Image (cartoon, rainbow, N blue to C red):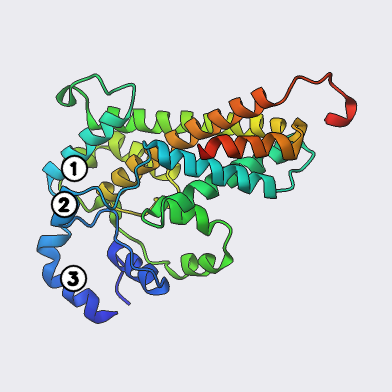
Amino acid sequence: MASFDSSDSETLREQSNHKKRRKIGHHTAADHNSAAAAVPWRSDAEQRIYSRRLVEALRRTPLSPARPRAAGQVRETADRVLAVAARGRTRWSRAILARRRKLWTHHEKAKKAPRNGLKRTTERTNRLPAVQKKTRVLSRLVPGCQKISFPNLLEEAMDYISALEMQVRAMSAIAELLSAAEPRRPESPAAR
Amino acid sequence: MSTRRSRSRQQSRVSTEITDAQITDLVSKLQQLIPELRARRSDKVSASKVLQETCNYIKNLHREVDDLSDRLSQLLATTDSNSAQAAIIRSLLM
């Protein structure tokens, strides 16, 4: 088989999923006019829905008595609920959801051919070693984006940043509500 | 599927070629998202700087989420579960 390019991996994923999804970098005339495909991370409604789902999910999660483990559980839950809110439109969100599903691991292993995603560009700047190095760092910070093209990486990063900002706003608000709701009790050994 | 690939090969000149202008546009859009760089003019900030600050910003956001997760895990452990959390969900619905 000839080497895969990034559009092939997308094809593979699209075939394995029943929902029809647009690649985030696939621009059509309609996209430029409407932001229909993008999730409104800045909207109050979106944050309220996320907060509610997060609290519900946390209530269902039996938290470990060990504090570091419990914090990890909260983080995982918060990330998962955030990824669901993305409605499958972005690679980073699908990667987060895939973390818990072994089915995806098999797909990852099947795609062994090297890809030139990051080099597929005409911009001279992108060939500078400094830019390439930072691009690689960025690709590791955004989930599931290590082998995609530079433009797609930037688009994923933008959406991911907006989502993370909402996550921070929502979790801060929930923490404030929880601190306010709980009258300060004297510390008892059983509480820890 | 070979048909999909051969079709994209024919269109490759149109659909997969990425222009310099597209890249510049994306980099400046990204710059607008980064608080550190928002105020500066796009032509004064290099792509390298934008990428650098983007990475820093995401790392900071991750750290904030970790801290908040820790704080929430503590609050959830000490809060009287049903009444306080029910009150919170109610207020989140409004």
Name the residue located 53 percent from the left edge and 48 percent from the top edge: A81
Q: Secondary structure at mark 3?
A: helix
Report crowding for label 2: few under 14, some 14 to 19, many 20 or more residues within 10 A (C-alpha): some
Report crowding for label 3: few under 14, some 14 to 19, many 20 or more residues within 10 A (C-alpha): some
Q: Mark 2 vs mark 3: which is more N-terminal?
A: 3
Compared with residue A62, is residue A15 higher up or lower down, i.e. above or below? below
CA separation in Å, label 2 and label 1: 7 Å
Pointer 1 and pointer 3: residues touching (CB < 8 Å)?
no
Do we see residue A137 in this rendering? Answer: no
Pointer 2 and pointer 3: residues touching (CB < 8 Å)?
no
| Lateral position of residue A72 relative to residue B12, left or right | right
Name the residue located 46 percent from the left edge and 71 percent from the top edge: A110
Q: Position of residue A107 (x, y in %)?
A: 47, 69
Which amino acid, mark 3? Answer: Ser
The residue beneath circle 3 is B8
Pointer 2 and pointer 1: residues touching (CB < 8 Å)?
yes
Compared with residue A1, is residue A124 higher up or lower down, i.e. above or below? above
Res. A165 image quadrant = top left
Q: Are marks 2 and 1 on the same chain?
A: yes
Residue B18: numbered disc = 2
Which amino acid, mark 1? Answer: Ile
Which amino acid, mark 2? Answer: Ile
Report crowding for label 1: few under 14, some 14 to 19, many 20 or more residues within 10 A (C-alpha): many
Q: Secondary structure at mark 1?
A: helix
Q: Using the image, name the chain to which the residue with label 3 belongs.
A: B
Q: Secondary structure at mark 2?
A: loop
Name the residue located 74 percent from the left edge and 47 percent from the top edge: A62
Q: Mark 2 vs mark 1: which is more N-terminal?
A: 2
The residue beneath circle 1 is B23
CA separation in Å, label 1 and label 3: 22 Å
Q: Position of residue B2 (x, y in %)?
A: 26, 80
| Lateral position of residue A182 relative to residue A24, left or right | right
